[in-house]
Image (cartoon, rainbow, N blue to C red):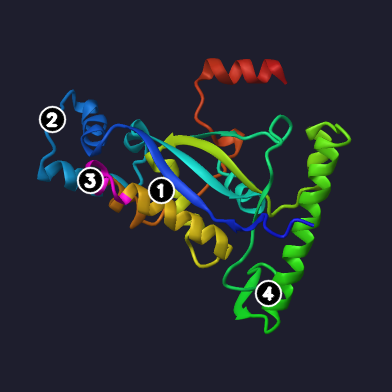
């Protein structure tokens, strides 16, 4: 059995690899309604950006696009993939790629289950975490060994052999989307009620964007502003204002 595999080397990563737009892009997108724009970012532009985020005017932030290279275990990637609005995702496919698998292991130990199932886990680490991790590594080694045997010796198709690989398998993907969309990902996944591993990934993504000086005002505004919830209002059909002509058409349709 190969005990020197990559079982415990898997770590989450988020690297910003491309960007389109800046704080000035956001400010000018907002000012276009009045047919105005600035060539350089000024103090009133920063104030405008803060106002936009505070009042829930999200569309100007959609004109800034970011692209990340990401790496995380399957069980985290699938949670992140749920964020669809304003984002696109292309991932390494184990149907075609049969490289030696890499697995994630919790270096901080195994957390105890929370009484409230919605919370997921507590901050308490199991006293036998070391023994559990040893057993986990052994199981991952066996999984890797059998996977490799089926691929290299029995010539089994990777699209089937991948069924042996667990949710802790590390995966990689390109993630592209608007500044607002990624801010929303961070706001939700860095929150205390998110899974701890998701929080770690969100903080890595957050740190990457914070490095971009040209987006300092927009990112700070989006990250420090709570999302406004628009109340839904149900209006009865009969109460909608209609012209006499439309009313006649409705009566004829009935």
Looking at marks 1 and 3 on the same chain, the residue that comes earlier in the sequence is marked by 1
**Labels 1 & 3 near each other (Cβ < 8 A):** no
Q: Is residue 165 visible?
A: yes
Q: Which quadrant holds the C terminus?
A: top right
Query: For the residue carrying disc 3, how many other residues have a C-alpha within 10 Å: few (<14), some (14-19), or many (20+)?
Result: few
Q: Mark 1 points at which residue?
A: 183
Q: Name the residue under label 4.
A: 116
Q: Name the residue under label 2.
A: 38
Q: Is mark 4 on a helix, strand or loop?
A: loop
Magenta segment main secondary structure: helix
Query: For the residue carrying disc 4, how many other residues have a C-alpha within 10 Å: few (<14), some (14-19), or many (20+)?
Result: few
Q: Distance between the residues labelled 1 and 2?
A: 25 Å
Looking at marks 4 and 2 on the same chain, the residue that comes earlier in the sequence is marked by 2
In the image, the segment drawn in magenta is 210-217
Looking at marks 1 and 2 on the same chain, the residue that comes earlier in the sequence is marked by 2
Where is residue 169? Give x, y as percent: 68, 50
């Amino acid at each position: 059995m190969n005990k020197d595999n990559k079982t415990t080397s898997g770590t989450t990563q988020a690297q910003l690899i491309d960007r389109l737009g800046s704080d000035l892009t956001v400010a000018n997108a907002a000012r276009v309604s009045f047919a105005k724009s600035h060539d350089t970012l000024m103090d009133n532009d920063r104030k405008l950006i803060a106002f936009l985020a505070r009042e829930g005017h999200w569309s100007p932030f959609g004109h800034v696009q970011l692209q990340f290279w990401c790496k995380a275990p399957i069980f985290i990637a699938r949670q992140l993939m749920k964020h669809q609005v304003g984002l696109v995702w292309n991932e390494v496919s184990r149907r075609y790629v049969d490289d030696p698998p890499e697995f994630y292991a919790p270096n901080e130990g195994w957390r105890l289950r929370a009484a409230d199932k919605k919370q997921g886990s507590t901050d308490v680490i199991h006293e036998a975490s070391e023994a559990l991790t040893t057993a986990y590594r052994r199981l991952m080694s066996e999984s890797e060994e059998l996977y490799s045997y089926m691929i290299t010796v029995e010539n089994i198709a990777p699209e089937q052999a991948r069924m042996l690989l667990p949710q802790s398998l590390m995966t990689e993907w390109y993630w592209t989307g608007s500044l607002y969309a990624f801010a929303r990902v961070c706001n939700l996944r860095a929150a205390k009620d998110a899974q701890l591993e998701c929080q770690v990934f969100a903080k890595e993504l957050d740190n990457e964007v914070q490095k971009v000086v040209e987006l300092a005002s927009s990112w700070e505004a989006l990250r420090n502003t709570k999302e406004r919830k628009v109340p839904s209002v149900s209006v009865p059909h009969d109460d909608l204002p209609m012209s006499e002509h439309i009313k006649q058409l409705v009566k004829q349709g009935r």
